[in-house]
Amino acid sequence: MRQYFNIAEIGSVPRSIVKRPPPPAGISFFGNARVLTNIIVSLFLERFPKLKIVSVENGVGWVPFMLETLEYQMQEARIKYTIPPFELFRRQIYACSWFERRNFPASARMLGVDNVLFETDFPHPTCLYRTH
């Protein structure tokens, strides 16, 4: 019998089941998505409106999907919030990009152009310097 894992459970899967090493920085945005989701769902930012948060080393293209999903799921779960996730993001959260081209303009418009930052971290993998 084949076994499937919910993506949210991947972090808790024993290393013996996962046959590959973890992906390098920038390839997997799931860690950042999980942390930002927890921060938004906890309503922590509503209690601390001056606090600013930056998501780094994972791009921005996934963020609109995450925020739309959160709005839907929070409504379905009847989590009472006063500021919708998209609005909360525009008020207090920033995300960094360094490689994206395809949907970058649309993502920046959805998130707010002032909330999207350029990132470079030479010689870290999340930079534009070519090593090959």
Image (spheres, rainbow, N blue to C red):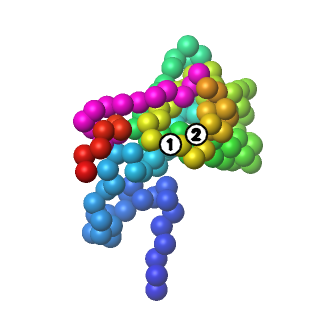
The quarter of the displayed image where residue 31 is located: top left
Residue 89 versus residue 14 in the image, above or below = above
Disc 2 + disc 1, Cβ < 8 Å = yes
Residue type at mark 2: give it. Answer: Phe
Q: Is mark 1 on a helix, strand or loop?
A: loop
Using the image as rendered, state which of residue 27 and residue 10 is in the foreground. 27
Q: Residue at x 59, y 16 (%)?
A: 49
Using the image as rendered, state which of residue 130 and residue 92 is in the foreground. 130
Q: Mark 1 points at which residue?
A: 100
Q: What stretch is highlighted in magenta?
A: 114-126
Q: Where is residue 75 in the image (x, y as percent from the top left)?
A: 74, 43
Residue 112 part of the magenta-drawn span: no
Residue 45 versus residue 1 in the image, above or below = above
Q: Main secondary structure of the magenta part?
A: loop
Q: Position of residue 46 (x, y in %)?
A: 62, 22
Residue 64 versus residue 86 in the image, above or below = below
Q: Residue at x 36, y 31 (%)?
A: 120
Please rate how many residues cluster around mark 1, counting C-alpha atoms within 10 Å: few if below 14, some from 14 to 19, many from 20.
few
Name the residue at the bottom extreme.
1
Q: Name the residue under label 2.
A: 104
Residue 14 versus residue 96 in the image, above or below = below
Q: Which residue is drawn at 45% across and 58% down?
A: 9
